[in-house]
Image (cartoon, grey):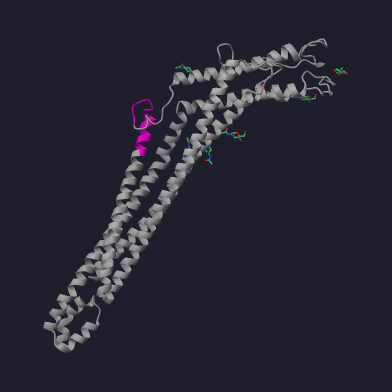
Protein backbone atom coordinates (compact mmCIF):
# COMPACT_ATOMS: atom_id res chain seq x y z
CA UNK A 1 0.00 0.00 0.00
CA UNK A 2 2.69 2.53 0.99
CA UNK A 3 4.68 1.63 -2.09
CA UNK A 4 1.70 2.54 -4.20
CA UNK A 5 1.22 5.77 -2.29
CA UNK A 6 4.89 6.62 -2.75
CA UNK A 7 4.54 5.82 -6.41
CA UNK A 8 1.62 8.24 -6.61
CA UNK A 9 3.60 10.93 -4.85
CA UNK A 10 6.59 10.23 -7.07
CA UNK A 11 4.36 10.73 -10.12
CA UNK A 12 3.04 13.99 -8.67
CA UNK A 13 6.59 15.07 -7.83
CA UNK A 14 7.87 14.42 -11.35
CA UNK A 15 4.76 16.13 -12.66
CA UNK A 16 5.45 19.13 -10.47
CA UNK A 17 9.04 19.36 -11.68
CA UNK A 18 7.94 19.08 -15.32
CA UNK A 19 5.22 21.63 -14.70
CA UNK A 20 7.56 24.10 -13.02
CA UNK A 21 10.26 23.79 -15.66
CA UNK A 22 7.78 23.71 -18.54
CA UNK A 23 5.72 26.65 -17.39
CA UNK A 24 8.81 28.71 -16.58
CA UNK A 25 10.27 28.10 -20.03
CA UNK A 26 6.91 28.59 -21.66
CA UNK A 27 6.39 31.87 -19.83
CA UNK A 28 9.85 33.11 -20.86
CA UNK A 29 9.42 32.02 -24.45
CA UNK A 30 5.93 33.48 -24.68
CA UNK A 31 7.17 36.83 -23.34
CA UNK A 32 10.12 36.70 -25.75
CA UNK A 33 7.73 36.11 -28.66
CA UNK A 34 5.49 38.90 -27.45
CA UNK A 35 8.46 41.22 -27.17
CA UNK A 36 9.52 40.40 -30.72
CA UNK A 37 6.03 41.06 -32.07
CA UNK A 38 5.72 44.28 -30.09
CA UNK A 39 9.11 45.45 -31.34
CA UNK A 40 8.10 44.73 -34.92
CA UNK A 41 4.96 46.74 -34.34
CA UNK A 42 6.85 49.56 -32.65
CA UNK A 43 9.31 49.64 -35.51
CA UNK A 44 6.42 49.94 -37.95
CA UNK A 45 4.80 52.70 -35.92
CA UNK A 46 8.09 54.55 -35.69
CA UNK A 47 8.63 54.27 -39.43
CA UNK A 48 5.14 55.60 -40.14
CA UNK A 49 5.57 58.44 -37.67
CA UNK A 50 8.95 59.39 -39.12
CA UNK A 51 7.54 59.41 -42.61
CA UNK A 52 4.65 61.65 -41.62
CA UNK A 53 7.08 63.94 -39.87
CA UNK A 54 9.20 64.27 -43.01
CA UNK A 55 6.17 64.68 -45.21
CA UNK A 56 4.87 67.51 -43.02
CA UNK A 57 8.26 69.11 -43.45
CA UNK A 58 7.75 69.07 -47.21
CA UNK A 59 4.95 71.58 -46.87
CA UNK A 60 7.22 74.13 -45.25
CA UNK A 61 9.46 74.21 -48.30
CA UNK A 62 8.82 77.27 -50.40
CA UNK A 63 12.05 78.12 -52.08
CA UNK A 64 11.53 81.72 -53.22
CA UNK A 65 7.82 81.18 -53.67
CA UNK A 66 8.48 78.32 -56.04
CA UNK A 67 6.16 75.82 -54.43
CA UNK A 68 5.90 72.14 -55.01
CA UNK A 69 3.20 71.40 -57.58
CA UNK A 70 -0.16 71.55 -55.80
CA UNK A 71 -1.17 67.98 -56.75
CA UNK A 72 2.00 66.77 -55.02
CA UNK A 73 0.98 68.79 -51.95
CA UNK A 74 -2.49 67.23 -51.96
CA UNK A 75 -1.04 63.75 -52.30
CA UNK A 76 1.29 64.41 -49.42
CA UNK A 77 -1.57 65.68 -47.24
CA UNK A 78 -3.73 62.67 -47.97
CA UNK A 79 -0.90 60.22 -47.42
CA UNK A 80 0.01 61.95 -44.18
CA UNK A 81 -3.47 61.55 -42.68
CA UNK A 82 -3.59 57.88 -43.69
CA UNK A 83 -0.17 57.14 -42.27
CA UNK A 84 -0.91 58.95 -39.01
CA UNK A 85 -4.12 57.04 -38.54
CA UNK A 86 -2.42 53.74 -39.32
CA UNK A 87 0.37 54.47 -36.87
CA UNK A 88 -1.99 55.46 -34.07
CA UNK A 89 -4.27 52.47 -34.57
CA UNK A 90 -1.38 50.04 -34.68
CA UNK A 91 0.21 51.56 -31.60
CA UNK A 92 -3.01 51.46 -29.59
CA UNK A 93 -3.88 47.92 -30.62
CA UNK A 94 -0.40 46.65 -29.89
CA UNK A 95 -0.11 48.08 -26.40
CA UNK A 96 -3.68 47.04 -25.57
CA UNK A 97 -3.22 43.49 -26.81
CA UNK A 98 0.22 42.99 -25.35
CA UNK A 99 -1.03 44.14 -21.92
CA UNK A 100 -3.95 41.72 -22.17
CA UNK A 101 -1.77 38.83 -23.29
CA UNK A 102 0.71 39.51 -20.50
CA UNK A 103 -2.12 39.51 -17.97
CA UNK A 104 -3.40 36.16 -19.24
CA UNK A 105 0.07 34.63 -19.18
CA UNK A 106 0.64 35.81 -15.63
CA UNK A 107 -2.76 34.48 -14.51
CA UNK A 108 -2.06 31.10 -16.11
CA UNK A 109 1.35 31.05 -14.52
CA UNK A 110 -0.06 31.81 -11.04
CA UNK A 111 -2.74 29.15 -11.48
CA UNK A 112 -0.16 26.56 -12.49
CA UNK A 113 2.19 27.35 -9.63
CA UNK A 114 -0.67 27.29 -7.12
CA UNK A 115 -1.96 23.97 -8.42
CA UNK A 116 1.48 22.41 -8.43
CA UNK A 117 2.17 23.55 -4.86
CA UNK A 118 -1.25 22.51 -3.58
CA UNK A 119 -0.99 19.12 -5.26
CA UNK A 120 2.38 18.39 -3.77
CA UNK A 121 1.25 19.57 -0.34
CA UNK A 122 -1.92 17.52 -0.59
CA UNK A 123 -0.02 14.38 -1.55
CA UNK A 124 2.38 14.78 1.36
CA UNK A 125 -0.33 15.61 3.91
CA UNK A 126 -2.37 12.74 2.55
CA UNK A 127 0.52 10.37 2.96
CA UNK A 128 1.23 11.56 6.50
CA UNK A 129 -2.45 11.31 7.40
CA UNK A 130 -2.68 7.83 5.99
CA UNK A 131 0.38 6.88 8.02
CA UNK A 132 -0.93 8.40 11.24
CA UNK A 133 -4.55 7.51 10.48
CA UNK A 134 -6.80 10.49 11.13
CA UNK A 135 -9.81 9.21 9.28
CA UNK A 136 -12.02 12.29 9.39
CA UNK A 137 -9.18 14.44 8.16
CA UNK A 138 -8.60 11.92 5.40
CA UNK A 139 -12.20 12.30 4.26
CA UNK A 140 -11.81 16.07 4.09
CA UNK A 141 -8.61 15.68 2.13
CA UNK A 142 -10.17 13.22 -0.23
CA UNK A 143 -12.90 15.73 -1.06
CA UNK A 144 -10.46 18.58 -1.58
CA UNK A 145 -8.24 16.20 -3.50
CA UNK A 146 -11.01 15.40 -5.94
CA UNK A 147 -11.63 19.12 -6.34
CA UNK A 148 -7.98 19.72 -7.12
CA UNK A 149 -7.86 16.83 -9.54
CA UNK A 150 -10.88 18.30 -11.28
CA UNK A 151 -9.18 21.71 -11.42
CA UNK A 152 -6.03 20.13 -12.76
CA UNK A 153 -7.95 18.37 -15.49
CA UNK A 154 -9.64 21.66 -16.36
CA UNK A 155 -6.21 23.34 -16.53
CA UNK A 156 -5.06 20.43 -18.66
CA UNK A 157 -7.96 21.18 -20.99
CA UNK A 158 -7.08 24.88 -21.04
CA UNK A 159 -3.54 24.00 -22.00
CA UNK A 160 -4.68 21.59 -24.71
CA UNK A 161 -6.75 24.45 -26.10
CA UNK A 162 -3.77 26.83 -25.78
CA UNK A 163 -1.56 24.25 -27.47
CA UNK A 164 -4.05 23.93 -30.32
CA UNK A 165 -4.36 27.68 -30.61
CA UNK A 166 -0.58 28.10 -30.80
CA UNK A 167 -0.24 25.27 -33.33
CA UNK A 168 -3.09 26.63 -35.43
CA UNK A 169 -1.70 30.16 -35.36
CA UNK A 170 1.76 28.93 -36.27
CA UNK A 171 0.33 26.81 -39.05
CA UNK A 172 -1.76 29.69 -40.36
CA UNK A 173 1.30 31.95 -40.39
CA UNK A 174 3.35 29.31 -42.21
CA UNK A 175 0.58 28.81 -44.75
CA UNK A 176 0.25 32.53 -45.29
CA UNK A 177 4.01 32.93 -45.73
CA UNK A 178 4.02 30.17 -48.34
CA UNK A 179 0.92 31.34 -50.22
CA UNK A 180 0.38 35.04 -49.50
CA UNK A 181 -2.12 35.51 -52.30
CA UNK A 182 -4.04 32.26 -51.83
CA UNK A 183 -7.14 32.00 -49.66
CA UNK A 184 -5.63 31.14 -46.31
CA UNK A 185 -6.85 31.68 -42.78
CA UNK A 186 -4.94 34.95 -42.52
CA UNK A 187 -5.36 36.36 -46.02
CA UNK A 188 -8.68 37.97 -45.07
CA UNK A 189 -7.20 39.70 -42.04
CA UNK A 190 -4.04 40.94 -43.73
CA UNK A 191 -4.81 42.53 -47.04
CA UNK A 192 -1.64 42.75 -49.06
CA UNK A 193 -1.28 45.18 -51.87
CA UNK A 194 -0.13 43.49 -55.04
CA UNK A 195 3.18 44.08 -56.77
CA UNK A 196 1.66 46.35 -59.40
CA UNK A 197 0.23 48.82 -56.88
CA UNK A 198 3.48 48.75 -54.97
CA UNK A 199 5.37 49.62 -58.11
CA UNK A 200 2.94 52.49 -58.68
CA UNK A 201 3.70 53.85 -55.23
CA UNK A 202 7.41 53.51 -55.89
CA UNK A 203 7.02 55.35 -59.18
CA UNK A 204 5.02 58.08 -57.48
CA UNK A 205 7.65 58.47 -54.80
CA UNK A 206 10.36 58.79 -57.46
CA UNK A 207 8.28 61.38 -59.27
CA UNK A 208 7.90 63.43 -56.10
CA UNK A 209 11.66 63.27 -55.57
CA UNK A 210 12.23 64.47 -59.14
CA UNK A 211 9.72 67.28 -58.57
CA UNK A 212 11.55 68.46 -55.48
CA UNK A 213 14.92 68.36 -57.25
CA UNK A 214 13.33 70.39 -60.03
CA UNK A 215 12.18 73.05 -57.58
CA UNK A 216 15.59 73.22 -55.95
CA UNK A 217 17.53 73.41 -59.21
CA UNK A 218 15.14 75.95 -60.65
CA UNK A 219 15.95 78.18 -57.71
CA UNK A 220 19.70 77.61 -58.06
CA UNK A 221 19.77 78.29 -61.80
CA UNK A 222 17.34 81.20 -61.92
CA UNK A 223 18.09 82.96 -58.62
CA UNK A 224 21.22 81.86 -56.78
CA UNK A 225 23.60 81.50 -59.70
CA UNK A 226 22.63 84.76 -61.38
CA UNK A 227 23.95 88.26 -60.89
CA UNK A 228 20.72 90.24 -61.06
CA UNK A 229 20.40 94.00 -60.95
CA UNK A 230 19.18 95.44 -57.61
CA UNK A 231 15.67 96.00 -58.91
CA UNK A 232 15.14 92.28 -59.59
CA UNK A 233 12.60 90.53 -57.33
CA UNK A 234 15.16 88.08 -55.96
CA UNK A 235 18.15 90.36 -55.64
CA UNK A 236 19.98 89.90 -52.40
CA UNK A 237 23.48 90.86 -53.53
CA UNK A 238 24.38 87.28 -54.51
CA UNK A 239 28.02 87.01 -55.62
CA UNK A 240 30.98 84.66 -55.63
CA UNK A 241 31.55 81.23 -57.20
CA UNK A 242 28.60 79.37 -58.73
CA UNK A 243 26.69 77.05 -56.50
CA UNK A 244 26.52 73.41 -57.79
CA UNK A 245 23.09 72.08 -58.71
CA UNK A 246 21.49 69.11 -57.05
CA UNK A 247 21.89 65.74 -58.73
CA UNK A 248 18.78 64.05 -60.13
CA UNK A 249 18.77 60.58 -58.58
CA UNK A 250 16.58 59.21 -61.42
CA UNK A 251 16.59 59.72 -65.15
CA UNK A 252 13.51 60.39 -67.27
CA UNK A 253 12.71 56.66 -67.22
CA UNK A 254 12.87 56.84 -63.40
CA UNK A 255 15.85 54.48 -63.37
CA UNK A 256 18.78 55.18 -61.03
CA UNK A 257 21.39 57.41 -62.63
CA UNK A 258 24.91 58.54 -61.83
CA UNK A 259 25.48 62.16 -60.79
CA UNK A 260 27.37 64.38 -63.20
CA UNK A 261 30.70 65.98 -62.16
CA UNK A 262 29.14 69.43 -61.62
CA UNK A 263 26.27 68.07 -59.54
CA UNK A 264 26.19 67.54 -55.83
CA UNK A 265 24.62 64.39 -54.43
CA UNK A 266 21.62 64.42 -52.07
CA UNK A 267 23.85 63.08 -49.31
CA UNK A 268 26.43 65.87 -49.69
CA UNK A 269 24.29 68.81 -50.76
CA UNK A 270 23.61 70.38 -47.36
CA UNK A 271 27.27 70.29 -46.46
CA UNK A 272 28.54 71.60 -49.78
CA UNK A 273 25.98 74.42 -49.99
CA UNK A 274 27.00 75.66 -46.56
CA UNK A 275 30.08 77.10 -48.26
CA UNK A 276 27.93 79.18 -50.59
CA UNK A 277 25.96 80.81 -47.80
CA UNK A 278 26.59 84.52 -47.21
CA UNK A 279 26.19 86.60 -44.10
CA UNK A 280 23.26 89.01 -44.24
CA UNK A 281 22.81 92.52 -42.95
CA UNK A 282 19.67 93.87 -41.29
CA UNK A 283 17.93 94.49 -44.63
CA UNK A 284 18.44 90.86 -45.67
CA UNK A 285 21.15 91.56 -48.30
CA UNK A 286 24.39 89.60 -48.45
CA UNK A 287 27.26 91.46 -46.81
CA UNK A 288 29.79 88.79 -47.78
CA UNK A 289 30.28 86.75 -50.91
CA UNK A 290 27.77 83.95 -51.27
CA UNK A 291 25.03 82.56 -53.44
CA UNK A 292 22.27 82.02 -50.88
CA UNK A 293 21.12 83.73 -47.70
CA UNK A 294 20.87 81.60 -44.55
CA UNK A 295 17.07 81.58 -44.99
CA UNK A 296 17.29 80.15 -48.50
CA UNK A 297 19.98 77.76 -47.39
CA UNK A 298 17.58 76.42 -44.75
CA UNK A 299 14.88 75.99 -47.36
CA UNK A 300 17.20 74.12 -49.70
CA UNK A 301 18.51 71.96 -46.89
CA UNK A 302 15.02 70.91 -45.80
CA UNK A 303 14.14 70.08 -49.41
CA UNK A 304 17.18 67.84 -49.51
CA UNK A 305 16.21 66.26 -46.21
CA UNK A 306 12.80 65.59 -47.70
CA UNK A 307 14.35 63.76 -50.64
CA UNK A 308 16.53 61.78 -48.31
CA UNK A 309 13.47 60.79 -46.24
CA UNK A 310 11.51 59.73 -49.30
CA UNK A 311 14.42 57.65 -50.56
CA UNK A 312 15.04 56.17 -47.12
CA UNK A 313 11.47 55.43 -46.08
CA UNK A 314 9.91 54.39 -49.35
CA UNK A 315 11.34 50.84 -49.24
CA UNK A 316 10.11 50.07 -45.68
CA UNK A 317 6.73 51.61 -46.49
CA UNK A 318 6.49 49.47 -49.60
CA UNK A 319 7.46 46.38 -47.67
CA UNK A 320 4.67 47.17 -45.24
CA UNK A 321 2.32 47.67 -48.13
CA UNK A 322 3.03 44.44 -49.97
CA UNK A 323 3.34 42.56 -46.66
CA UNK A 324 6.97 41.57 -47.09
CA UNK A 325 7.61 42.94 -43.63
CA UNK A 326 4.80 40.89 -42.15
CA UNK A 327 5.96 37.87 -44.14
CA UNK A 328 9.49 38.19 -42.72
CA UNK A 329 8.08 38.60 -39.22
CA UNK A 330 5.85 35.55 -39.58
CA UNK A 331 8.67 33.53 -41.07
CA UNK A 332 10.81 34.42 -38.09
CA UNK A 333 8.03 33.53 -35.66
CA UNK A 334 7.24 30.19 -37.26
CA UNK A 335 10.88 29.15 -37.49
CA UNK A 336 12.27 30.64 -34.26
CA UNK A 337 9.43 31.01 -31.78
CA UNK A 338 6.78 28.42 -32.61
CA UNK A 339 8.76 25.19 -32.06
CA UNK A 340 9.91 26.06 -28.50
CA UNK A 341 6.47 27.38 -27.56
CA UNK A 342 4.81 24.16 -28.65
CA UNK A 343 7.50 22.07 -26.99
CA UNK A 344 7.11 23.79 -23.61
CA UNK A 345 3.33 23.63 -23.80
CA UNK A 346 3.63 19.86 -24.23
CA UNK A 347 5.91 19.65 -21.19
CA UNK A 348 3.44 21.68 -19.11
CA UNK A 349 0.64 19.38 -20.26
CA UNK A 350 2.67 16.28 -19.44
CA UNK A 351 3.38 17.74 -15.99
CA UNK A 352 -0.28 18.48 -15.39
CA UNK A 353 -1.19 14.98 -16.57
CA UNK A 354 1.37 13.34 -14.28
CA UNK A 355 0.24 15.39 -11.29
CA UNK A 356 -3.37 14.50 -11.92
CA UNK A 357 -2.58 10.81 -12.28
CA UNK A 358 -0.38 10.82 -9.19
CA UNK A 359 -2.92 12.57 -7.02
CA UNK A 360 -5.67 10.41 -8.45
CA UNK A 361 -3.68 7.32 -7.50
CA UNK A 362 -3.16 8.68 -4.00
CA UNK A 363 -6.85 9.47 -3.68
CA UNK A 364 -7.87 5.97 -4.72
CA UNK A 365 -5.45 4.56 -2.17
CA UNK A 366 -6.77 6.86 0.56
CA UNK A 367 -10.31 5.78 -0.20
CA UNK A 368 -9.30 2.15 0.00
CA UNK A 369 -7.50 2.93 3.24
CA UNK A 370 -10.38 4.89 4.68
CA UNK A 371 -12.80 2.09 3.97
CA UNK A 372 -10.54 -0.80 4.73
CA UNK A 373 -9.79 -0.36 8.43
CA UNK A 374 -13.42 -0.80 9.43
CA UNK A 375 -13.56 -4.21 7.81
CA UNK A 376 -10.18 -5.10 9.17
CA UNK A 377 -11.12 -3.87 12.60
CA UNK A 378 -14.02 -6.29 12.68
CA UNK A 379 -11.86 -8.99 11.23
CA UNK A 380 -9.19 -8.27 13.82
CA UNK A 381 -11.77 -8.12 16.59
CA UNK A 382 -13.00 -11.50 15.55
CA UNK A 383 -9.70 -13.17 14.97
CA UNK A 384 -7.52 -11.72 17.69
CA UNK A 385 -7.57 -12.23 21.38
CA UNK A 386 -8.92 -9.16 23.23
CA UNK A 387 -5.53 -8.29 24.75
CA UNK A 388 -4.08 -7.51 21.30
CA UNK A 389 -6.84 -5.18 20.13
CA UNK A 390 -5.97 -2.26 22.38
CA UNK A 391 -2.36 -2.43 21.28
CA UNK A 392 -3.19 -2.62 17.61
CA UNK A 393 -5.76 0.14 17.74
CA UNK A 394 -3.11 2.56 18.91
CA UNK A 395 -1.06 1.74 15.86
CA UNK A 396 -1.63 3.81 12.77
CA UNK A 397 -4.09 2.93 10.07
CA UNK A 398 -1.58 2.14 7.44
CA UNK A 399 0.05 -0.46 9.57
CA UNK A 400 -3.14 -2.46 9.68
CA UNK A 401 -2.16 -4.30 6.58
CA UNK A 402 1.22 -5.12 8.10
CA UNK A 403 -0.30 -6.08 11.40
CA UNK A 404 -2.78 -8.16 9.53
CA UNK A 405 0.01 -10.05 7.84
CA UNK A 406 1.89 -10.43 11.07
CA UNK A 407 -1.20 -11.36 13.03
CA UNK A 408 -0.41 -15.07 13.16
CA UNK A 409 2.98 -14.33 14.77
CA UNK A 410 1.47 -11.92 17.25
CA UNK A 411 -1.22 -14.31 18.21
CA UNK A 412 1.19 -17.20 18.56
CA UNK A 413 3.45 -15.05 20.68
CA UNK A 414 0.48 -14.09 22.76
C1 LIG B 1 13.20 45.70 -33.53
O1 LIG B 1 12.86 45.39 -34.88
C2 LIG B 1 13.65 46.07 -35.86
C3 LIG B 1 13.11 45.69 -37.22
O2 LIG B 1 12.98 44.35 -37.42
C4 LIG B 1 15.12 45.70 -35.68
O3 LIG B 1 15.89 46.40 -36.62
C5 LIG B 1 15.55 46.04 -34.27
O4 LIG B 1 16.87 45.64 -34.05
C6 LIG B 1 14.65 45.36 -33.25
N1 LIG B 1 15.03 45.81 -31.93
C7 LIG B 1 15.12 44.95 -30.89
C8 LIG B 1 15.49 45.54 -29.59
O5 LIG B 1 14.93 43.77 -31.05
C1 LIG C 1 12.84 57.75 -36.72
O1 LIG C 1 13.48 58.98 -36.52
C2 LIG C 1 14.31 59.03 -35.37
C3 LIG C 1 14.84 60.43 -35.23
O2 LIG C 1 14.97 61.06 -36.44
C4 LIG C 1 15.45 58.01 -35.55
O3 LIG C 1 16.27 58.00 -34.41
C5 LIG C 1 14.83 56.62 -35.73
O4 LIG C 1 15.84 55.68 -35.99
C6 LIG C 1 13.84 56.62 -36.89
N1 LIG C 1 13.18 55.33 -36.91
C7 LIG C 1 13.13 54.54 -37.97
C8 LIG C 1 12.40 53.28 -37.84
O5 LIG C 1 13.67 54.85 -39.02
C1 LIG D 1 7.97 46.49 -60.64
O1 LIG D 1 9.19 47.16 -60.74
C2 LIG D 1 10.29 46.34 -61.08
C3 LIG D 1 11.55 47.17 -61.09
O2 LIG D 1 11.32 48.47 -60.74
C4 LIG D 1 10.04 45.71 -62.43
O3 LIG D 1 11.12 44.84 -62.76
C5 LIG D 1 8.76 44.91 -62.40
O4 LIG D 1 8.47 44.40 -63.68
C6 LIG D 1 7.61 45.81 -61.96
N1 LIG D 1 6.44 44.99 -61.81
C7 LIG D 1 5.25 45.38 -62.24
C8 LIG D 1 4.13 44.45 -62.00
O5 LIG D 1 5.09 46.45 -62.79
C1 LIG E 1 30.30 63.27 -50.83
O1 LIG E 1 31.49 63.97 -50.49
C2 LIG E 1 32.59 63.15 -50.19
C3 LIG E 1 33.75 64.03 -49.79
O2 LIG E 1 33.37 65.32 -49.54
C4 LIG E 1 32.94 62.29 -51.40
O3 LIG E 1 34.01 61.42 -51.06
C5 LIG E 1 31.73 61.49 -51.80
O4 LIG E 1 32.04 60.75 -52.97
C6 LIG E 1 30.54 62.37 -52.03
N1 LIG E 1 29.40 61.54 -52.28
C7 LIG E 1 28.71 61.60 -53.41
C8 LIG E 1 27.56 60.64 -53.53
O5 LIG E 1 28.98 62.38 -54.25
C1 LIG F 1 34.03 74.45 -47.64
O1 LIG F 1 35.07 75.43 -47.73
C2 LIG F 1 36.23 75.09 -47.00
C3 LIG F 1 37.17 76.22 -47.09
O2 LIG F 1 37.05 76.90 -48.28
C4 LIG F 1 36.81 73.80 -47.55
O3 LIG F 1 37.95 73.43 -46.81
C5 LIG F 1 35.78 72.69 -47.45
O4 LIG F 1 36.27 71.48 -48.03
C6 LIG F 1 34.53 73.10 -48.15
N1 LIG F 1 33.52 72.10 -47.92
C7 LIG F 1 32.86 71.50 -48.86
C8 LIG F 1 31.85 70.48 -48.43
O5 LIG F 1 33.02 71.77 -49.99
C1 LIG G 1 27.49 92.79 -51.69
O1 LIG G 1 28.45 91.78 -51.47
C2 LIG G 1 29.81 92.19 -51.55
C3 LIG G 1 30.68 90.95 -51.32
O2 LIG G 1 30.58 90.06 -52.37
C4 LIG G 1 30.09 93.28 -50.56
O3 LIG G 1 31.44 93.75 -50.69
C5 LIG G 1 29.11 94.41 -50.75
O4 LIG G 1 29.30 95.41 -49.76
C6 LIG G 1 27.71 93.92 -50.71
N1 LIG G 1 26.78 95.00 -50.98
C7 LIG G 1 25.80 95.37 -50.16
C8 LIG G 1 24.95 96.48 -50.62
O5 LIG G 1 25.62 94.81 -49.08
C1 LIG H 1 14.31 36.87 -35.98
O1 LIG H 1 14.28 37.04 -34.59
C2 LIG H 1 15.55 36.99 -33.95
C3 LIG H 1 15.37 37.09 -32.46
O2 LIG H 1 14.61 38.19 -32.09
C4 LIG H 1 16.40 38.14 -34.48
O3 LIG H 1 17.67 38.09 -33.88
C5 LIG H 1 16.51 38.00 -35.99
O4 LIG H 1 17.21 39.12 -36.51
C6 LIG H 1 15.14 37.95 -36.63
N1 LIG H 1 15.26 37.68 -38.06
C7 LIG H 1 14.53 38.31 -38.96
C8 LIG H 1 14.73 37.90 -40.38
O5 LIG H 1 13.70 39.18 -38.66
Q: Is residue 223 above or below residue 97?
A: above
Q: Which residues are magenta?
A: 169-184
Secondary structure predominantly adopted by residues drawn in magenta: helix
- Could you tell me residue 199's position as x and y percent? 49, 19
Which quarter of the frame holds ligand 4? top right
Q: Is residue 113 above or below residue 335?
A: below
Instruction: Decide which of 338, 83 is in the foreground and name it.
Output: 83
Q: Is residue 46 above or below residue 374?
A: above
Give left or right: position of 47 versus 331: right
Q: Residue at x 19, y 69 (%)?
A: 368
**Residue 336 visible from this viewpoint:** yes
- Could you tell me residue 92's position as x and y percent? 49, 38
Q: Residue at x 77, y 19 (%)?
A: 292
- Could you tell me residue 238's position as x and y percent? 80, 16
**Residue 358 visible from this viewpoint:** no
Instruction: Decide which of 367, 1 is in the foreground and name it.
Output: 367
Q: Quadrant of the C terminus?
A: bottom left
Give left or right: position of 235 versus 263: right
Q: Residue at x 66, y 24 (%)?
A: 60
Q: Is residue 402 magenta?
A: no
Amino acid sequence: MEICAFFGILLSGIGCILLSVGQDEFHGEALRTLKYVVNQSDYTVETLRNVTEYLSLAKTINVAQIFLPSNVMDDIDKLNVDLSTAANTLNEKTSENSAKIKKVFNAVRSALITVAALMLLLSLIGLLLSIFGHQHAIHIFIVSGWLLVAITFILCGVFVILDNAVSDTCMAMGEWVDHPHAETALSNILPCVDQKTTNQTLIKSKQVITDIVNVVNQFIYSVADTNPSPDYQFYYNQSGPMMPALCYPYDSQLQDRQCGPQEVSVANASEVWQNYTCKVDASGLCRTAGRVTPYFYGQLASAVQEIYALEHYTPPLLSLQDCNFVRDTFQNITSNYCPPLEHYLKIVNAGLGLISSGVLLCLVLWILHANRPRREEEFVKLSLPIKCISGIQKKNVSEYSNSHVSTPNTSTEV
